[in-house]
């Protein structure tokens, strides 16, 4: 089965997405997500100019060989643009293989290891009452896990705020240029434990609570936050400290039993290797669309399984419905599933993407259509042209750059 066409579509139904379409001589079409928030055009160019022409004529069934061809053959290793491009090709080829076999992708991965995929939603609130009302929406909708984010007194805007409803999400990349905001760690460290205490007081311990620190703390500050949250039994705190320095997590580990999750900005198994093999984390958050696709992410999860680390894949709205569908197939089949993020997608996403996944009682299932169970309306996509959008940045009060 030969690849005859490779096409990248950049469109903005609700937010910018880059989508890869691979067509074979059998007439089969596979879809992959090539979206990298704020760098969509870079991945699109990489695919159009440096990957697509190399794939024409190759056997679409040889997923593993094509993966190595694009990884080793590209010479320049790793990085978010390269690994997102490879991921899009990989996912599209798994979609094609499933369609050729007449099976959903999870069946090709060994079949279902669970009935469904537990997801967490994004609750947030400018103050405690607003946050409690948002958590209530997710609990009422059947969610078994909820991420809690809140404003910080004295700070104009903080990460994770927006879209107070289970059915209308929010998009953090909201500026034609990066907006700049002030960050101060002290008020955050003082305020967050009080907010989480209020959520636990209202909802008890029957719902999993998660929080995203979003790279904003030093290791010792992260250890302090983890310890202050121990009474509230967090499912995890995420991105507690920037993880280029994987060994930094040992310092956090020494100070707290709060579970640690990291990895959404990682793009290869080598970004995770030290963290996993030293048991410095509890969940690995690498995503199918930024970590080389199903083929590579399955290797990450297999390594994690050896060390008791579970999956916790990134699933924000800037990972397209194609990415979320692929994540569900993998989440359903792996032995060490932990948690899947589900932020939803901004309308009118469903005027372009059609999906087979369904939500019930806190769990998603990818459906049993052959392949990924997704489709993409190219004609509709033309109604939503790309618009430059960037994530915000933080600066400290003295003007120093800081993680947002
Ligand atoms: C998450 C992530 C997002 C990122 C976004 C970047 O946990 O979902 O941290 O909120 O900021 O995906 O594009
Ligand atoms: Mg995050």
Image (cartoon, rainbow, N blue to C red):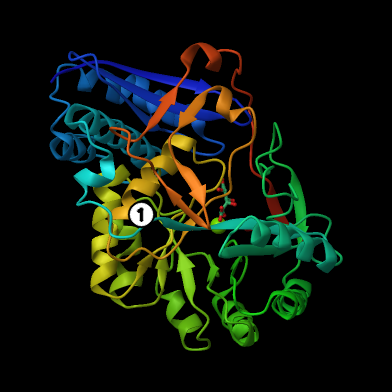
Badge 1 local density, few (<14 within 10 Å), some, or many (20+)? many
**x and y percentages locating residue 168 in the rendered image:** 69, 42
Residue marked by disc 1:
331
Image check: 25 left or right of 261?
left
**x and y percentages locating residue 182 in the rendered image:** 78, 57
In what quadrant of the picture does the N terminus appear? top left
Quadrant of ligand 2: it is bottom right
**x and y percentages locating residue 29 in the rendered image:** 29, 21
Name the image quarter holding residue 89. Answer: top left
Q: Could you tell me which secondary element the residue under label 1 belongs to? A: helix
Q: Is mark 1 within 8 Å of ligand 1?
A: no
Name the image quarter holding residue 388. Answer: top right
Residue at (34% x, 35% y) in the render: 372
Residue 5 appears anywhere in the view: yes
Image check: 204 left or right of 128?
left
**x and y percentages locating residue 184 in the rendered image:** 76, 67
| Vertical arrangement, residue 123 with respect to residue 106, above or below | below
Residue at (34% x, 78% y) in the render: 279
Frontmost residue, 297 versus 111: 111
| Vertical arrangement, residue 251 with respect to residue 109, above or below | below
Frontmost residue, 35 versus 217: 35
């Amino acid at each position: 089965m030969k690849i005859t066409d490779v096409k990248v579509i950049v469109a903005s139904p609700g937010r910018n997405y880059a989508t890869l379409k691979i067509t074979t001589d059998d007439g089969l079409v596979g879809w992959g997500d090539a979206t990298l928030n704020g760098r969509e055009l870079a991945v699109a160019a990489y695919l159009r100019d440096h990957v697509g022409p190399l794939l024409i004529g190759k056997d679409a069934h040889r997923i593993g060989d094509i993966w190595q061809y694009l990884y080793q053959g590209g010479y320049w290793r790793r990085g978010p643009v390269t690994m997102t491009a490879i991921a899009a090709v990989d996912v599209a080829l798994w979609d094609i293989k499933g369609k050729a076999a007449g099976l959903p992708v999870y069946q090709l991965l060994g079949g279902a290891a669970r009935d469904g995929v537990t997801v967490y939603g994004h609750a947030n609130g400018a103050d405690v009452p607003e946050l409690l009302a948002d958590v209530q929406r997710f609990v009422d909708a059947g969610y078994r896990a909820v991420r809690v984010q809140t404003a910080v007194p004295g700070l104009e805007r903080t990460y994770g705020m927006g879209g107070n409803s289970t059915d209308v999400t929010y998009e953090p990349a909201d500026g034609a240029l990066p907006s700049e905001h002030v960050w101060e760690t002290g008020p955050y460290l003082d305020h967050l434990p009080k907010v989480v205490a209020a959520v636990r007081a209202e909802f008890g311990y029957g719902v999993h609570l998660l929080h995203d620190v979003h790279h904003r703390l030093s290791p010792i500050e992260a250890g302090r936050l983890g310890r202050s949250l121990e009474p509230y039994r967090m499912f995890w705190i995420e991105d507690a400290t920037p993880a280029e320095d994987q060994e930094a997590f040992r310092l956090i580990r020494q100070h707290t039993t709060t579970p640690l999750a990291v990895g959404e900005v990682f793009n290869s198994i080598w970004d995770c290797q030290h963290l996993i093999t030293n048991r410095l984390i509890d969940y690995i958050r690498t995503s199918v669309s930024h970590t080389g696709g199903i083929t590579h992410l399955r290797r990450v999860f297999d390594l994690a399984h050896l060390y008791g680390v579970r999956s916790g894949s990134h699933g924000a709205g800037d990972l397209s419905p194609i990415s979320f569908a692929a994540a569900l197939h993998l989440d359903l089949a792996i032995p060490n599933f932990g948690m899947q993020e589900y932020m939803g997608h901004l309308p009118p996403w469903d005027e372009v993407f059609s999906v087979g996944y369904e939500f019930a009682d806190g769990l998603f299932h990818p459906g049993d259509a052959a392949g990924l169970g997704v489709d993409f309306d190219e004609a509709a996509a033309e109604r939503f042209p790309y618009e430059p959008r960037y994530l915000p940045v933080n600066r400290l009060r003295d003007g120093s750059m800081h993680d947002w």
